[in-house]
Image (cartoon, helix red, strand yellow):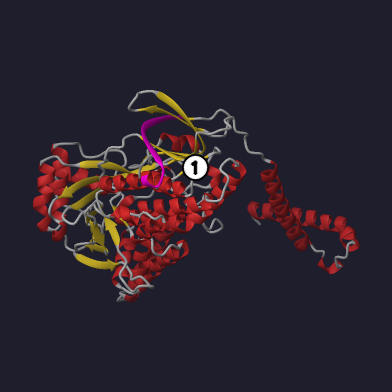
């Protein structure tokens, strides 16, 4: 018998002896209260002790919450019911919603000029529905917006069509909207002011925290008078973007934004009708990373090239031009080349970092009297265009949750926010997991390295199907889409924010892996080939699990199957913390 076996036997005998002694001691007491002797065994005692311990833990946790009193406000008569930091997508939608509830709302925005951005231009059908529920559908009018009817994905010389499903009530095809971000923001700001919110131009410098753990307003610099001013409010809402300094101040240290890649953006003029599939998001799976082209008006096209490196980009000027014209453009449709070249030659190129930030839980917010919304709270890779859909859904849920709550009662506000975090999971977790999973599948980890090889004159560019460990998963996703039916409508319904179900997403994800395994085995032509096929099947399923497991754990779902201590995304060499 080995030393390990001997040690295991010693431990087993020690545990059994302890349990038997415990049974002997408590048996008379249990029999006196009516427990039959035959039920008093080491197994039942250990189960009973475990259950009692769990019950005591839950009772003590509830007592702690009951006995924990919220900090007492230091400012009794507040200037506003709600002050909102940021006059963007979330700030204006919330300003409108709360003003309609007869709450006094102030929105502080750093610049009230029309912004010029290359993201936030695609609103999925689910986001359109949430916008209508907020009573802001008119904001989609008067800005030359284009309808979006679905996606077309190009891979290895093939294309698969993913149209949005029809509305079950009307029978009409669901549609998203694409537009210029700045024009949409200006419409939202006008709507918020029309509904009663006040917008001022200023830079928030500090949150008011006279009593530790309680936010009671903000300090800001008025950009017109250059004066430092103070505004008090019962509730402060932070929604000034993923780069907000307040995100780091208000959330636990373990939840920092992660820069995973960059978008290089061009606007191709007079090309809306030249897309291979007009009124759709055209996704080209390039050798290094995905490229997304969609109409952002009835005439122009937004082209977003993902550069899979969170640390650096090609240098502006000659290197950037070489990257776009020689490395990227040959993989795009020829009828876009002229407009693409014109934008590059004239230097009309914009770059933005793509951040990921896991969804917030009540436990990760470190202070009372404040809540984070929009990208300041939660963002996912923008490849699927789901950001505004999550934001408008969050705004609707938060406004409904706080509608009948006395904002002066911090206990009631905290309970309402706990409910908000639970209710938002259905939409947010679905889109978060899907966006980050698809990006990881479609963007090979060696993408940036391939560009470096190309610069050195190594002209052979490895294709997506050859160059990384997720190649089997990538091919399986594409083949799954090609099967049509529920294999196409299910994923695009999830992507479009129409089907809001993390459970259905996980089922589809593993269905991709198992259908891929079936295809691998079906194509096997010899007995010896079975060994390779079974190895590939194992690689496929294990890759799927390693990919989606950490994403599920980040959303605090199915903790018993995907504990965060095991399923934890490490920081890649091409990624960085903000």
Q: How many marks?
A: 1
Task: Kindly tell me whether residue 62 is visible in this rendering.
Answer: yes
Residue 105: x, y in percent?
45, 41
Identify the residue under disc 1: 371
Locate the C terminus by quadrant. Answer: top left
Residue at image x 68%, y 48%?
62
Q: Is residue 30 left or right of residue 555?
A: right
Q: Residues within 10 Å of mark 1 (few under 14, many from 20)?
A: many
Residue in front for this viewpoint, 444 or 207: 207
Residue 124: % across, % down: 33, 58
The spot of residue 208 in percent (x, y) is 51, 30
Residue 304 drawn at (x, y percent):
23, 50
Label 1 residue SS: strand
Q: Which residues are magenta?
A: 194-206
Question: Could you say which is closer to the camera, residue 389 or residue 4?
Answer: 389
The dominant secondary structure in magenta is strand
């Amino acid at each position: 018998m080995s030393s390990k076996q001997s040690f295991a036997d010693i431990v087993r005998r020690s545990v059994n002896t302890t349990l038997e002694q415990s049974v002997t001691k408590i048996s008379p007491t249990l029999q006196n209260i009516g427990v039959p002797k035959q039920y008093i065994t080491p197994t039942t005692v250990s189960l009973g002790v475990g259950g009692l311990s769990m019950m005591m833990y839950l009772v003590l946790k509830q007592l702690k919450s009951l006995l924990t009193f919220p900090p007492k406000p230091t400012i009794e008569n507040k200037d506003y019911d709600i002050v909102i930091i940021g006059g963007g997508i979330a700030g204006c939608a919330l300003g409108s919603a709360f003003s309609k509830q007869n709450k006094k709302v102030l929105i502080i925005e750093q610049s009230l000029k029309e912004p010029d951005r290359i993201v936030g231009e695609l609103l999925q059908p689910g986001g359109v529905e949430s916008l209508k529920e907020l009573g802001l559908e008119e904001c989609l009018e008067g800005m030359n917006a284009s309808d979006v009817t679905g996606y077309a994905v190009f891979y290895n010389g093939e294309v698969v069509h993913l149209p949005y499903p029809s509305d079950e009530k009307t029978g009409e095809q669901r549609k998203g909207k694409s537009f210029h971000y700045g024009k949409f923001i200006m419409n939202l700001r006008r709507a918020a002011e029309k509904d009663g919110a006040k917008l001022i131009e200023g830079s928030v410098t500090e949150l008011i925290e006279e009593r530790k753990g309680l936010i009671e307003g903000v300090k800001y610099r008025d950009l017109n008078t250059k004066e430092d001013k103070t505004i008090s409010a019962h509730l402060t809402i932070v929604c000034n973007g993923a780069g907000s300094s307040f995100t780091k101040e208000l959330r636990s240290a373990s939840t920092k934004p992660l820069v995973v890649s960059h978008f290089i953006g061009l606007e191709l003029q007079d090309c809306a009708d030249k897309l291979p599939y007009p009124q759709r998001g055209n996704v080209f799976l390039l050798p290094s990373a995905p490229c997304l082209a969609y109409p952002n008006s009835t005439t122009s096209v937004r082209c977003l090239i993902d550069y899979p490196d969170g640390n650096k980009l090609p240098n502006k000027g000659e290197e950037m031009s070489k990257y776009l014209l020689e490395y990227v453009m040959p993989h795009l449709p020829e009828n876009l080349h002229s407009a693409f070249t014109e934008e590059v030659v004239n230097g009309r190129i914009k770059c933005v970092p793509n951040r990921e930030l896991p969804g917030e839980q009540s436990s990760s917010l470190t202070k009372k009297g404040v809540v984070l919304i929009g990208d300041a709270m939660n963002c996912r890779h923008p490849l699927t265009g789901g950001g505004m859909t999550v934001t408008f859904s969050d705004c609707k849920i938060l406004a409904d949750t706080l509608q009948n709550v006395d904002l002066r009662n911090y206990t009631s506000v905290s309970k309402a926010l706990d409910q908000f975090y639970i209710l938002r999971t259905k939409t947010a977790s679905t889109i978060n997991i899907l966006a980050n999973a698809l990006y990881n599948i479609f963007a090979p980890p060696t993408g940036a390295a391939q560009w470096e090889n190309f610069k050195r004159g190594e002209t052979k560019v490895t294709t997506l199907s050859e160059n990384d460990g997720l190649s089997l998963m990538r091919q399986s996703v594409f083949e799954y889409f090609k099967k049509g039916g529920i294999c196409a409508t299910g994923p695009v319904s999830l992507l479009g924010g129409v089907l809001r179900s993390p459970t259905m997403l996980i089922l589809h994800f593993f269905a991709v892996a198992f259908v891929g395994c079936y295809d691998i085995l079906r194509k096997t032509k010899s007995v010896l080939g079975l060994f390779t096929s079974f190895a590939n099947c194992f690689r496929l399923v294990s890759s799927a699990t390693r990919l989606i497991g950490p994403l599920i754990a980040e959303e605090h779902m199915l903790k018993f199957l995907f504990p965060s201590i095991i399923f934890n995304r490490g920081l890649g060499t091409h990624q960085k913390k903000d």
